[in-house]
């Protein structure tokens, strides 16, 4: 379970998070929506300890992330897969080597046979052919890079998956492919997921619940049906462009 309580974060004079309460239950997919620049990615980075709150608490499985020691934080991060917005693949490495980086257990990572099998398993999970393992990022389309990034994120068999704009920059067909993979990984792997996105329709499709972040706070949270019916002005204003 992920729980943020009264989290505040500012950068200089810019207040980004202003008392955020946010909870994700085990096994669910939570979509985090909101206008650009409202701190969605900042919130995401608090969950795996890349950023610490100025005040408030961030708890994952009952552990206060900001107060974990280095080894404890490393162990927690081994259970959290992070899908970066643009894939964040290393151009000098082929796909096999990029995905292998996601294997967080040192013993497994040093076993060539295990790595070969795990990389092929992950490629299969994201619907890419095995031959992709020998390609380099420059040989891949934007949609394929996103899927390789997702394969790397699941290589360590995480409990949690954090997606930072997984469909950003993709055409509708490839965006639908990524959305289908989010659903597939939830159903087949049982991961708990937080999906930061601008894609309202896709988010309503893949999520169990949706949270709207605006003006530094969670303005509303609920199931897709509850959000569609919400009378909250901020929700109506944000959704009216996609659901009329």
Image (tube, rainbow, N blue to C red):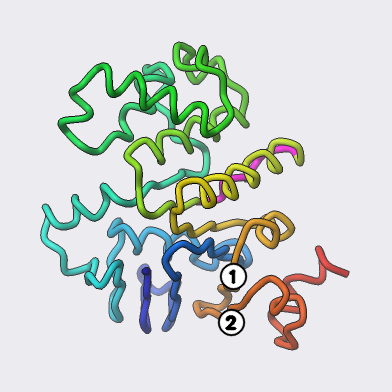
187 w.r.t. 219: above or below: above
Point 21% across, 37% down: residue? 105
Q: Which of marks 2 and 1 is in front?
A: 1
Left or right? Give the position of 87 relative to 177.
left
Residue found at the far front of this picture = 188
Q: Is residue 7 left or right of residue 238?
A: left
Q: Name the residue under label 1.
A: 209
Reply yes or no: does residue 165 show up in magenta.
yes
Q: Is residue 162 above or below residue 101?
A: below
Q: Which of marks 2 and 1 is nearer the N terminus?
A: 1
For the C terminus, give its image quadrant: bottom right
The quarter holding residue 121 reads top left
| Residue at the spot 62% in from the left edge and 41% down from the top edge | 178
Q: Which residue lies furthest to the bottom in this view?
A: 231
Q: Mark 1: few, some, or many residues within 10 Å (few <14, many ≥20)?
A: many
Residue 155 percent coordinates (x, y):
37, 35
Q: Within 10 angstroms of label 2, few (less than 14), some, or many (20 or more) residues?
A: some
Does the stretch in magenta take in 208?
no
* Dot label at residue 121: none
Residue drawn at (27%, 17%), measured in percent from left and top?
A: 113
Q: Do the residues labelled 2 and 1 touch (CB within 8 Å)?
A: no
Could you tell me residue 74's position as x and y percent?
19, 50
Q: Where is residue 148 in the image (x, y as percent from the top left)?
A: 49, 30
Label placed on residue 219: 2
Span shown in magenta: 164-171
Q: How many marks?
A: 2
Looking at the image, is 107 positioned above or below residue 244? above
Q: Is mark 1 on a helix, strand or loop?
A: strand
Q: Is the magenta stretch mostly helix, strand or loop?
A: loop
Disc 2 to disc 1, how far (Cα)?
14 Å
């Amino acid at each position: 379970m992920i729980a943020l309580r009264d989290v505040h974060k500012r950068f200089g004079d810019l207040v980004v998070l202003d008392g955020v309460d946010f909870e994700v239950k085990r096994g669910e997919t939570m979509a985090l929506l909101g206008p650009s620049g409202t701190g969605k990615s900042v919130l995401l980075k608090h969950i795996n300890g890349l950023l610490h709150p100025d005040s408030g608490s961030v708890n994952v499985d009952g552990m206060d992330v900001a107060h974990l020691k280095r080894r404890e934080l490393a162990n927690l991060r081994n259970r959290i897969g992070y899908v970066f917005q643009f894939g964040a693949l290393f151009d000098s490495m082929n796909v096999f080597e990029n995905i292998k980086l996601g294997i967080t257990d040192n013993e497994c990572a040093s076993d060539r046979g295990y790595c070969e099998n795990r990389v092929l398993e992950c490629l299969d999970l994201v619907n890419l052919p095995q031959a992709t393992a020998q390609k380099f990022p420059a040989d891949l389309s934007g949609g394929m890079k996103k899927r390789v990034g997702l394969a790397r994120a699941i290589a360590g068999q995480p409990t949690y998956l954090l997606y930072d704009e997984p469909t950003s920059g993709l055409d509708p067909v490839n965006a639908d492919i990524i959305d289908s993979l989010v659903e597939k990984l939830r159903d087949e792997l049982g991961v708990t997921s937080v999906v930061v996105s601008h894609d309202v329709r896709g988010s309503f499709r893949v999520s169990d619940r949706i949270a709207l972040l605006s003006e530094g706070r969670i303005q509303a949270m609920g199931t897709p049906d509850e959000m569609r019916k919400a009378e909250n002005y901020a929700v109506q204003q944000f959704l009216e462009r996609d659901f009329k």
